[in-house]
Image (cartoon, rainbow, N blue to C red):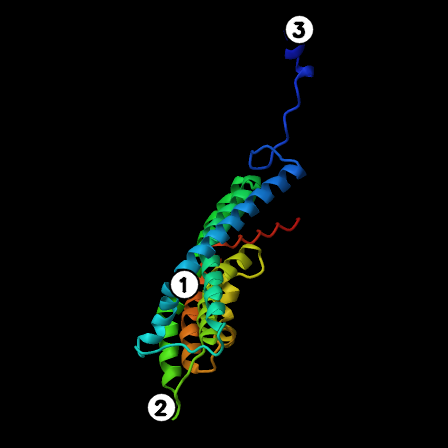
Amino acid sequence: MSAEAVSEPGNQPPEPPTYAGGHAEMTLIEHLKELRNRVIVCALALVVSLVVCVVFWETILGWLLAPARQDHPDFALAVFSPTETIGVLFKIGLYGSLILASPVFVYELMAFIVPGLTPREKRLLLPGLAGVIIFLLGGMAFAYWIILPASLGFLLDFGGDNFDPVIGAKQYIDFATRIIFWVGVSFELPMVIALAARLGLVRARQLIKFWRYAIPIIFIIAAVVTPTPDPLTQSLVAGPLLALYVVGILFAWIVQKPRPKPEPEPV
């Protein structure tokens, strides 16, 4: 075939279709292969993180015990079976590996879905993702440095000399990790409000008028998040959530879509 025939417009191979973001569209098989590769990377990251956390499990346990030892330097955990220590080791390794490998999970997820987004969707997604990570880490840090020391100091001293607290290792790990994780999740309140406002489900003015109902709802959320019935821990969680509700109103004001202007009535 001559070069002239190849160069004719009708003989040019068709260009591959593209996403809205400007990237070449992939077939279903290519999507599945890419997804498989990214899942493998996430699994490898989890295994490596698990090995690291198991090797340094005593250091991680020391970090978890630090809030209780602020007011009780001799605080120690009890085990009630010969195998419980091994169970605690792997529980620490599992929780720690999920946290340590989470940046890889987030990166692989974003690398998989972002190429198919439009530039406008990317401008909304990336700041939103950054906000989710910041509020989650901020909530977990607040739980570790503020809520856990205060609540443990109160609970371990409750009852005075009438009780000699013997805390099981499994029960303490579950208690500490639950508070840290769920307080971190509850700090996502501003992002949830911003998403609802962006979708048109709520508006900032509605949230301002809703404040009388928001206070008891937030205290109910704090009671669910904290595994203790004491009012101190619930108040320590509810206080920041009330402030975050105000931050959520500000976010809603920024991201909410403007109301459509009413069309003029025909004369």
Q: State the image coordinates of residue 259 (x, y, percent, origin top left).
A: 55, 54
Q: Which residue is mark 3?
A: 2
* Identity, as a three-letter code, of the amino acid under mark 2: Gly
Horizontal arrangement in the rendering, residue 82 relative to residue 9 (left or right): left
Which amino acid, by three-letter code, is at mark 1? Trp
Answer with mark 1 or mark 2, whichever residue precedes in sequence.
1
Q: CA distance from mark 1 to mark 2?
A: 32 Å
In the image, is residue 172 above or below residue 164? above
Determine crowd level at label 3: few under 14, some 14-19, many 20+ residues with C-alpha closer than 10 A: few
Q: Quadrant of the N terminus?
A: top right
Task: Identify the mark nearer the N-term, 3 or 2.
Answer: 3
- Looking at the image, residue 75 lies above or below residue 13: below
Label 1, secondary structure: give it: helix
Circles 1 and 2 in contact, beta carbons < 8 Å: no
Q: Position of residue 8 (x, y in %)?
A: 66, 12
Q: Relative to residue 214, is residue 54 depicted above or below?
A: above
How far apart, in angstroms, are the residues tagged by discs 3 and 2? 97 Å
Q: Residue 43 vs residue 5: left or right?
A: left
Q: Nearer the viewer, residue 215 or 115?
A: 115
Residue indicated by mark 1: 57
Above or below — where is 261 with respect to 180?
above
Marks 3/1: CA–CA distance:
71 Å
Q: Earlier in the sequence, mark 3 or mark 1?
A: 3
Q: In the image shown, does 186 or 262 lie closer to the viewer?
A: 186
Q: Indicate which disc residue 160 carries.
A: 2
Q: Which mark lies nearer to you, 1 or 2?
A: 1
At numbered mark 2, what does the secondary structure look like: helix, strand or loop? helix
Q: Of discs 3 and 1, which sits in the foreground?
A: 1
What SS does tag 3 mark?
A: loop
Identify the mark at residue 130; answer none if there is no mark: none
| Amino acid tagged 3 | Ser
Q: Position of residue 235 (x, y in %)?
A: 42, 77
